[in-house]
Image (tube, rainbow, N blue to C red):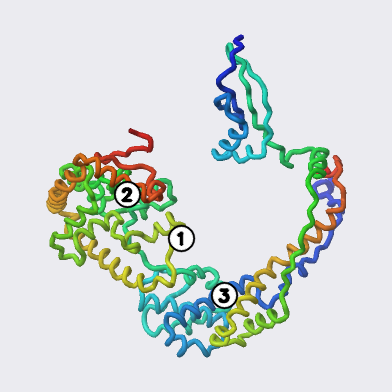
Amino acid sequence: MTTETPATKIVIVAGQEFSVSAETDNETIRQQLVSMGFADVATAKIEEGKRTAGEQELITVEFVKKAGTKGLSGAELAALLREVPRASVATATTRLAPAQRRVLHDLASGAYTFASAAAAAAEIEAALDAAEAEMYHQPSHEGAQLCSRVEPLSAAAAPSCPSGW
Amino acid sequence: MQPRGATLCRRRPQLPVRVVDTARSYRPRSPLSGYQADGYRAGLLAAQLLAEHFPAAYDKHVAARAVTPSHLYAVAVTFLSLVNRHMFPLQDSWDFELVVYGDIVAGAFGHGEGDDVCLSSLVEGKWQLQQPNPAFYGIGVQLAMGDGLDVEPEELQYDALTVFLWWLADRTQWRLGVDLGHYTGPHTDELADVLEAASQLPPGTPMEDLCAAFDAEPSSYGASMGRLLAYAFGQTDNCLADTSYSEILHVYEGRSDLTWNDTRDLIKLAVEAQQIASAYEIWHAHVATDSQALLALSARLCELAAPLAKEATRTKTLIELLVSGAEGRADPTWADDYPYNLGDDGTEVLDGDD
């Protein structure tokens, strides 16, 4: 086997192999791969290894994707959840103000004429915005409440549970 | 014999059941739901547009009326019908039934639709109020070139004159770069014979210059000959004449850059585009079924193109090359719009090719 430093190294990503100049910096390769559409590579771990090819021993650079939650065992998922920084869920603050409710009520009951509606365009616009926001408010508020109840519980593996933790 | 049903029918185990009352979750808290609010918003936008563009009609027929879903819908129909009749033709729409004949206000306010239908139409059709949706008169050149677009075959049918002109220019910079055989299908074998007998324009023919030269030819169709030639390639510089509605839908995904501030321009563009399109139709009717006329057209265009092509392909001096190079660099967007250049012989020169 030759002791000469090989001119190339092998990059392995998503089961595909590329040959690049041995001098190329791994982070440069990462950036290039991300720009080529390998989005996962941005957060992938780099594992270096060696492979013998004929007379040469080549360096391999494998981009190993960080595991997501899908397919993790309960213990792994619990460990992952412990790593995730705690964040409090902001409670939606959008509420229909009484004045806006009155504007909407007047609109719905036909109390405005087109001329008076044009004169009050700004208030009507704000009330319509609030009405649309209200549509999403309750589900997000209930979701936030649920999350706030779950947050203090510590994550632990529980194989008997369907979710595994 | 087992008693009937003894083994076939088994009592289901008692499963715990939780009754969930969702009524509270879905109870609307606002006097208007989000969807209804969206409809009101669209209708009020229509009223604002009517006041801006047709203030007399707004003051007389709308200002004093109560804001109701039915009136909001009627105002939208009034505005769009007035645009359609007095400004520029609009594309047909499912959402608003425009009043084409008779008194617009009477027609719009006498529709008799229920509140829910009115608000629903306003929500679905609000994009036509957010930006103009004019009728387009183009041939659909980009559709023909748009390989991979999800287009119905009938939207890709082109008349014989258009296919003939595309074939004539198939070696110039206006070539479509597609197999024109796809588009000769519906036409008779006669067209194929004409294509075989006719001469194509020389490579490197500057098509804008050819249109300018062709403009001097007498035209009895209602538009100049150069304009008609450019129309076949979507190159008239009139967006309504250069684009078809199918292209707006399939190539531009229903969006255009037009705004209600463009109405003055759109009025002129629509008149001109209609003229060009109807003139082209007449030209087509005169020559498309007449082989001799098509051959004469080909001969005349080649005659006009010959000196232009010769001038365009003559060896340039170093100074000309430097000047044209500097002009090319002055517009950095050019390279993004056109992934390839055409060489003097009309063939593609890929980036990096020598």
Horizontal side of residue B78 vs A147, given as left or right? left
Residue labelled with disc 3: B41
Dividing the image into 4 quarters, which one contains the N terminus of chain A?
Answer: top right
Image disc number at residue B307: none
User: Residue at horizontal 29%, vertical 70%?
Assistant: B271
Of pointers 1 and 3, the one earlier in the residue sequence: 3
Q: Nearer the viewer, residue B311 or A116?
A: B311
Mark 2 secondary-structure assignment: helix
- Count every numbered label the image shows and give the total: 3
Residue B251 x/y as whole percent: 42, 54
Characterize the local packing of mark 1: few (<14), some (14-19) or many (20 or more) Cα atoms within 10 angstroms.
Answer: few
Q: Are marks 2 and 3 on the same chain?
A: yes
Which of the 4 image quadrants contains residue A19? Answer: top right
Q: Nearer the viewer, residue A157 or B160?
A: A157
User: Residue at horizontal 36%, vertical 74%?
Assistant: B264
User: Residue at horizontal 36%, vertical 37%?
Assistant: B350
Which amino acid type is marked by label 1? Gly
Residue labelled with disc 1: B254
What is the chain identity of the residue bearing mark 2?
Answer: B
Horizontal side of residue B95 vs B178, given as left or right? right
Of pointers 2 and 3, the one earlier in the residue sequence: 3
Residue labelled with disc 2: B327
Which amino acid type is marked by label 2? Glu
Residue A98 x/y as whole percent: 73, 80
In the image, which is nearer the foreground, mark 2 or mark 1?
2
Of pointers 2 and 1, the one earlier in the residue sequence: 1
Q: Are marks 1 and 3 in contact (CB under 8 Å)?
A: no
Mark 3 secondary-structure assignment: helix
